[in-house]
Amino acid sequence: MILRRLLYPVADSDGRVATLRTIAALLAFALGVRYTGVLVPSALALVTIAVTGVALTVLFGTLAQVLADPSRIEAFSIRSSFVPGLRALALATVALAPPLLLLASMVGDVSGEPPTSEATGVVLLFGSTATLLFFFACLYVFPALLAIATTRGSVRRAADRELLVPVLSDLSYLSRWTLGLVLLIPAMSLVTTSLQSGEVAGVLAAGGAALLWVAGARVVGDGYDMALGTRTVE
């Protein structure tokens, strides 16, 4: 089953639509970021900022639909991914932004001046470890929250304990979340390449990142479905 999901972006019709849309959104986002940097402070920068925002929203929405229910992706309607994208961005802001900021702050403290005493070093070590664990805990909860919000059509209902607790405590979700995380790491490296390169390498990097993201989202989505008993192991 896992091998089939790794091939999902190219072997499944919904997967191909999601992959193409993800590539397009990534390229539009990369172009928007680059041209915004060039055009600021011109008024034309407002156009590129808008394009960047729409692309990011469609990107998040497409991956949210792949995670929760790929059959909802409409091939010729970007709007079908826009509202789920707004929900996904709202959830990411609440669930991931605080631990990311805390982690960045802790990394800055650790990489700064060396501790003046052994006690300070122990506190920094404990704090950095706790921050890292907190970040991964939020990262573990986020896909389940996103899947619930997407299927229920409401951010407010994302924290439904009757759905959330069984999913988070299920080994199927844990194992597939781990695989999804493994796919996410190289994808983020490819996204960086896509943002920095405006040539063929950037396009190829966007394609590679899209393949990994779509496959990872579907793998984690399978774990979510299996934890709720809506899908069995194939």
Image (spheres, rainbow, N blue to C red):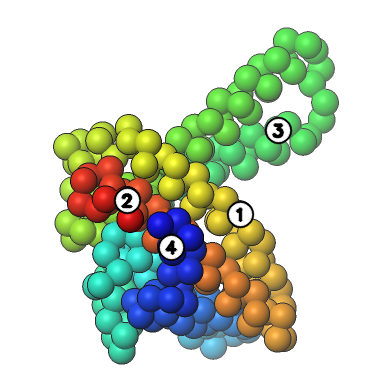
Q: In the current view of this chain or complex, which residue is farthest to the top?
A: 119
Whether residue 74 is situated above or below residue 151 in the rendered picture: below
Residue 201 horizontal/vertical position (percent):
72, 80
Determine the residue positioned at 78% across, 34% down: 112
Residue tagged by mark 2?
Answer: 233
User: What's the CA distance linking mark 2 and mark 3?
Assistant: 45 Å
Task: Compare residues 94 and 183 and report the one nearer the observer.
Answer: 183
Which mark sits nearer the N-terminus, 3 or 4? 4
Is residue 19 in view? Answer: no
Which mark sits nearer the N-terminus, 2 or 1? 1
Residue 165 horizontal/vertical position (percent):
26, 34
* SS at circle 2: loop
Which mark sits nearer the N-terminus, 1 or 4? 4
Image quadrant containing the C terminus: bottom left
Q: Nearer the viewer, mark 3 or mark 4?
A: 4
Q: Nearer the viewer, mark 2 or mark 1?
A: 2
* SS at circle 3: helix
Which amino acid, mark 3? Asp
* SS at circle 1: helix
Which amino acid, mark 4? Arg
Residue tagged by mark 4?
Answer: 5
Is residue 212 in view? Answer: yes
Residue 36 horizontal/vertical position (percent):
60, 79
Q: Along the horizontal axis of the image, is 45 left or right of 53?
A: right
Residue tagged by mark 3?
Answer: 109
Which amino acid, mark 1? Ile
Residue tagged by mark 1?
Answer: 185
Which mark sits nearer the N-terminus, 4 or 2? 4
